[in-house]
Amino acid sequence: MNKRTHLIKPLLGMDYGVISHGKGIYLYDEEGNSFLDGCSGAVTANIGHGVSEITEAMVNQANQVSFVYRSQFTSSSAEELAERLAQSAPGDLDWVFFVNSGSEAMETALKIAIQYWQELGRPTKNKVISRWMSYHGITMGALSMSGHVIRRSRFTAMLEQYPTLSPPYCYRCTFKDHCPNCSKQYALEFEREVQRLGADTIAAFVCEPIVGAAGGAVVPPETYFKEMKAVCNRYDILFIADEVMTGIGRTGKMYAMEHWGVVPDILALGKGMSAGYTPMAATLVSDRIIQTIERGSKIVLSGHTFSANPLSASICLAVFNYIKKHNVVENAEKSGAILLRGLENLKSIYPIIGDVRGRGLLTAIEFVQDPLTKEPFPLQNEVTNRFIRKCYEEGLLVYTAAGGLNGVAGDAVIVAPPLIIQEHEVQILLDKLNKGLTELVSELATEGLY
Ligand code: PMP
């Protein structure tokens, strides 16, 4: 390993193993090591690896046609997938715009929101309000919306200053003196921000239902979304839910917003939609917005060469069918509850775990130096990366969620295995986490860091 090759990898100089194949919740490398995929890659491989139904759908579609250009033709697989998504989505999210990544889905959401207000003769409504400790993608518009300090840092000069609101982060709540009525305070903060900027300048409010990569499975308080939606309604602001990570069953519901009964105007999907079998993502849009555009300029000013690619659409359709046929969403809820109980048990054993949290199979562990003061570890101690390495040595993959809030707090690791994981496999995962934790604590102690 550690060969210099021609492929630019995210971390130059890091050891990257070569995966030869995958089956179910396991990945196997060329050296014969196996890994329990405890984070589904980047919370993506929702139905596990090597599913033959998906391969068959791929081959069938490829034998018919692999590419048609979206401005000239449509395809039966793209049409059927759009119909299935619209039927499964809450409220009047009846329209689907296909793209190729979560970032593009969020770019499209932003553009459609701005266009909607233009069609209504209100072109000054062209900014969004978003929250710190959030991640909406790496392209410039999506990064502008993202409250992720480290990922923004090199490009601040080119970015809009969209994130201003506090994340609803119960473990380190901005409004802890108001507990358990903090939701009203978050809504008040939002309303003040709208008033400061002027409602006439705000197109949309953007949020992840459960914060993913920027914080680690941060679940908001129960009434948070109802309160935030009320502010949106009061000031004519669209509600954009970024369900790139949470959508398609990850949290034990098809769409995470269903947990709180709040219907967004625009909803972005990615990752689990194709379960990693192809690059594919989508922006779901409410009937009201599309009707407005139909009455106006009639054209959605966005799109990519590969949008609505028939091969990708057929793969997503096969994933969708698999999820329904095998009750995958129900399993995510059941296995997620077992996983969270197991994590709570680990928390009671290891004081280095300050918080465990999550919904369904999107869960996280947050490390602290002192559980009483919640003092985080200095970032240079790289506690998250060390833990990920320890787990890797135990044959378990987990995912980092560090540095999202202010580059200091939020030293968290995401545990999010494929949604097909069974109870006995959750137990194997927990045993490996336990071993990783023992190793981590002993290493930190040896170095005098803990
Ligand atoms: N939104 C959220 C909530 C995400 O988690 C991600 C990816 N981590 C994105 C957007 C960007 O998706 P992609 O990496 O596919 O561009």
Image (tube, rainbow, N blue to C red):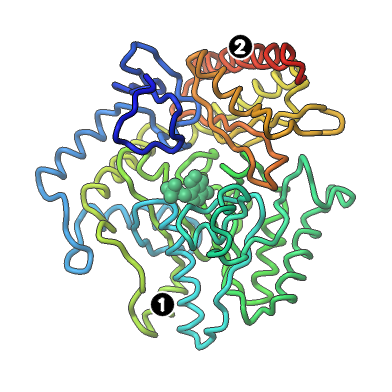
Q: Crowdedness of circle 1 by 10 Å Cα count: few (<14), some, many (20+)?
A: few
Outermost residue toward the right in this view: 177
Q: Can I make out residue 385 in this image? A: yes
Outermost residue toward the left in this view: 63
Q: Nearer the viewer, residue 173 or 81?
A: 173
Q: Can I make out residue 244 in this image? A: no
Q: Residue 172 at x, y = what percent?
A: 78, 43
Q: Residue 438 at x, y = what percent?
A: 66, 12
Residue pictured at 78% horizontal, 21% vertical: 351
Q: Residue 94 at x, y = what percent?
A: 41, 63
Residue at mark 2 to residue at mark 1: CA–CA distance: 55 Å
Q: Residue 83 at x, y = what percent?
A: 33, 57
Residue type marked 2: Lys
Residue pictured at 29% horizontal, 21% vertical: 20
Residue type marked 1: Gln
Find disc 1 in the rendering and name its residue. Answer: 291
User: Which quadrant of the view contains residue 199?
Assistant: bottom right
Q: Nearer the viewer, residue 103 or 420?
A: 103
Is 65 left or right of 397, judged from the image as shown? left
Looking at the image, residue 430 lies above or below residue 405: above
User: Which quadrant of the view contains residue 62?
Assistant: top left
- N-terminal label among 2 and 1: 1
Q: How many marks?
A: 2
Find disc 2 in the rendering and name its residue. Answer: 435
